[in-house]
Amino acid sequence: MKKEAKKKLGIYIHIPFCIRKCLYCDFLSASATKQEQERYLKALCREIETESRRYSDYEVQTVYLGGGTPSVFPGSWIERILDTLYRQYRIRKECEISMEVNPGTLTGDKLRAYKRGGVNRLSIGLQSTENEELLALGRIHSREDFGRSYESAAQAGFENLNIDLMSGIPGQTCTSWQRSLERVAALTPAPKHISAYSLIIEEGTPFFENPPELPDEDTDREMYRITNDILSASGYGRYEISNYAMPGYECRHNISYWRRENYVGFGIGAASLIGNTRFRNTADRKAYERFYLEDLKSPSQDREIKEEKQVLRIKEQMEEFMFLGLRMSKGVSRQEFFRCFGRELDEVYPGVVEDFCKKGLLQCKKDCEAGNEWISLTDYGVDVSNYVMAEFLISFLERH
């Protein structure tokens, strides 16, 4: 019989396969044969089973299947993964179970299998409604593919749908970006969540090796303004720098990252945070599979494939508290900072909050009933958020 849950846990599951890697993607992913994918699936389920002993006193609040492209797997494989979770872990009845899908890999049969398995939130990687822009990114789907996939997802009974959109991409203009936003906001049924990210060129990608011509900085900022204007007018609230949701449909899994709550990652390269210890699995797929399918003799041995284990010092915990918390529109709580660290925020960052408020980068909102105050980025602060974060770090290093 399972013990009574005492602690909350999020679970991330990494599916490192895709049909073809996009030109901007630096995620841990690659194409593979069906046989290679099935071997990985077996190792993944073995890890999930093995790790369950360590989390017997946790209750799972959220599950997130990411990649890669999880929807390259047959629907029955997703059911198998989730069935393993349900058998081995205490899953909260209202657990949010999200899955990333690519419009070029979805079918009605797959969607029905996801639903049977327990998936209740889909994140559809659209990126743009302009076919020329999709081609420029190296996406495998078209706008028309997305339309069919979206309709199929709604027919399969998925209500909690997120759409990923990307700004600042090759050939994009403010006009084409506005069209993408308006088309997505006008979908029936309306998506409950929209993630609107700006393209970042990462080292090791084709875009890094052969940089494309991108919209300039002023255009990128105008796109950000357009995003906020259109989505706000369509009933979406921005709750994080790049994320908008209908009331009550904020992504609980991602919020747990920004709040530094416990989560464990399964699969190659998957990161975890338990207490104040960060670690990740090896990124070597063959070593990972060999360990779980051939070498594993006792549960304690799986630490051999855990890498980059780091016990965070108080200084590092404070930095993460500020950097991650300020990504959220609500911001950071003075009361919570003191509860976590036993020190006042202004003692650790003397004068920084006051200075940034005067510059229009931060704002403070009092919660008189709770005796608390929240510090958050202004719209201008969001626009130059990297600068704000850097100044907090510099201030901390100068005094500690």
Image: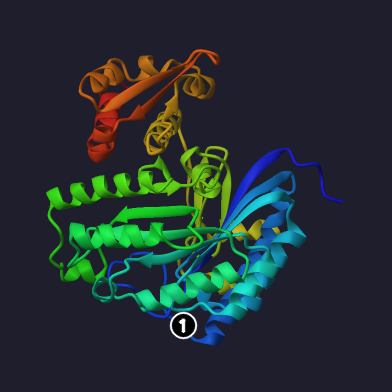
Q: Residue 105: where, in percent of width, then height?
A: 48, 78
Q: Is residue 369 left or right of residue 232?
A: right
Q: Position of residue 267 (x, y in %)?
A: 55, 64
**Could you say which quadrant of the image residue 13 lies in?**
bottom right
Is residue 396 visible in the rendered image? The answer is yes
Residue drawn where x is 53% and y is 43% of the image: 256
| Label 1 environment density (alpha carbons within 10 Å; few <14, some 14–19, many ≥20) | some
Q: Which residue is drawn at 43% across and 15% down?
A: 344
Q: In this view, does 387 lie to the left or right of 257?
A: left
Q: Report the coloring of the rendering.
A: rainbow
Secondary element at tag 1: loop
Residue corresponding to mark 1? 32
Question: In the visual, does 254 lie left or right of 217?
Answer: right
Compare residues 142 and 280 and report the one nearer the observer: 142
Q: Residue at x 23, y 63 (%)?
A: 176
Total marks shown come to: 1
Q: Nearest the camera: 238 or 93?
A: 238
- Residue ID at (19%, 47%): 221
Return the x and y of residue 70 as percentages of the image width and height.
Answer: 52, 70
Quadrant of the rendered image containing residue 112:
bottom right
Quadrant of the image for the C terminus?
top left
- Residue 294 appearing in the image: no
Which kind of residue does numbered mark 1 sit on? Ala
- The one of 119 and 69 positioned closer to us in this rendering: 119
User: Can you say whether 315 is above or below 28 in the image?
Assistant: above
Q: Which residue lies furthest to the right in this view?
A: 1
Whether residue 161 is situated above or below residue 347 in the rendered picture = below
Q: Is residue 160 above or below residue 144?
A: above
Q: Where in the figure is residue 306, as x and y percent of width and height? A: 53, 57
